[in-house]
Image (spheres, rainbow, N blue to C red):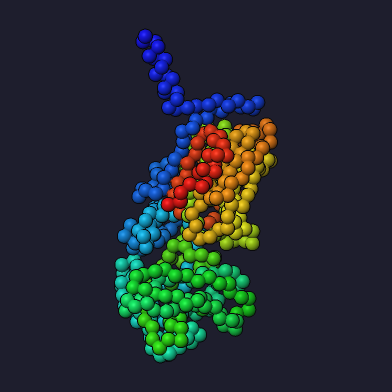
Amino acid sequence: MRLRAFLAGLLLAGQAHAQIVVRHPAFAVVQSTAPALDLNFLTTTLDSRVTFSRASTRSCTNSSGQIVSVAVNVACMDYDPGTLALKGLSVEAAGTNLLYYSQDFSNAVWTTNAATTKTAAYATAPDGTTTAARVQLVSSGNQAVTWFQQNLAGAGVGASLPNTVSLWVKSTSGANQTFAIKSTQSGVADHFSSDLVATSTWQRFSFSTTFAAGGAGYFAGVTVGSALASADIEVWGLQLETGYATTSYIPTTSAAVTRAADVAYVNVVGLQGINGNTGSLFGQMVYEAPVVTATSAAARWLSFNDGNNPNAGTEFGFEGGSIVDGLIDNQATRTVMSNVVASTMPGTTYRLAIAFSPINAAEAGNSTAYPTATRAAGSTPLSLTVLNLNQSQRFQGQASIWFQRVTYYPAYLGPAWVTNKANGAIP
């Protein structure tokens, strides 16, 4: 009876923690349907298994919606300033604010015309300091003649490159006020955003355009009103950066300032099943901004590799304006698939999943699923050592992402699992 009870207990334990042994001519792999790695970034503390570094300070939004500075090598667990919901671990590429005195509007680099009045250090800014400026339209005007701006004199600004101006704006009176964002040049057509509306709460607005070749000077700022008799807004934290989308705020004084890249990875040496060339990987991320380094700009967002060989592993990434995912067997044998999942739109949440075995692979992204593919027979096991979170080992650059969940299972869970994970509810 005791032996029978003991054997029954072993059977129940085996059902609770299922393991499958898969044999292949080149190797044998122990698989498990329990996750070997589950990283939840929708928490206030960074998982201790993540190694994180950054060579500079950076801005981050705290749980109260206030802009704060985090120290060198301290991760930003970022919050939405409007809803105060936790957005996840922010991992950003390096970026540079080309505007000087980004919150000191008493400095002479910031100018206004006769139809506009500027009052520096007027109100409490999103970072809690009294550094927001008041900008008023005091006579009738329009976007072309009423302005508060900075002349960049071409310094650090590249012709024919995309650029984005961003700033925080609120209405002084509480009533809605109209304004526009300016990013333009002398000698070429002006570039203004459409009419934007400031309300009683601080909001960050942005406008992207491309500087043309041959412009004599470069300007960035705001225009107050749009053929209105009066307008009254407060502004703070102006930023001009290369690229099609905003990244975290970079305060400046007498020179442009660069924020260093965030670097995050997990050491996966010894992780169950990781070097068996069989597994299932899931990631949920919110896209902040693309990498802009070349026409064919690309970056891997989430990838297993060996720390040295750039063409080894499993990856999700960005390439040429679209999300791609794929599987790489080894340096000589690239892959099973590399499919476009969706266009890369800032603020969009992506759920991506791949399941791979020595024979098959399946993948899906958001609502798009791909059929099972056949892998080349005899693929050699990989010597994977790291799970990179948005590093640029293989491609030219790095995008900016909020990571929310990353899970790895040491088993080939198949196309149904892949589709279900990719089509799951997005918070």
Give the residue at x 40% y 71%: 168
Residue pushed farthest top?
1
| Res 76 visible | no
Give the residue at x 48% y 51%: 285
**Percent of width and height locating residue 230:** 38, 86
Give the residue at x 50% y 85%: 144
Using the rendered view, name the quadrant where residue 11 is placed: top left
Task: Please say if 125 is above or below 423.
Answer: below
Considering depth in this image, is 134 or 404 the residue closer to the camera?
404
Task: Please say if 112 is above or below 342.
Answer: below
On the picture, is 164 further left or further right than 326? left
**Percent of width and height locating residue 318:** 58, 54
On the picture, is 382 further left or further right than 427? right
Considering depth in this image, is 209 or 82 the residue closer to the camera?
82
Using the rendered view, name the quadrant where residue 232 is placed: bottom left
Give the residue at x 47% y 27%: 18
Q: Quadrant of the image for the N terminus? A: top left
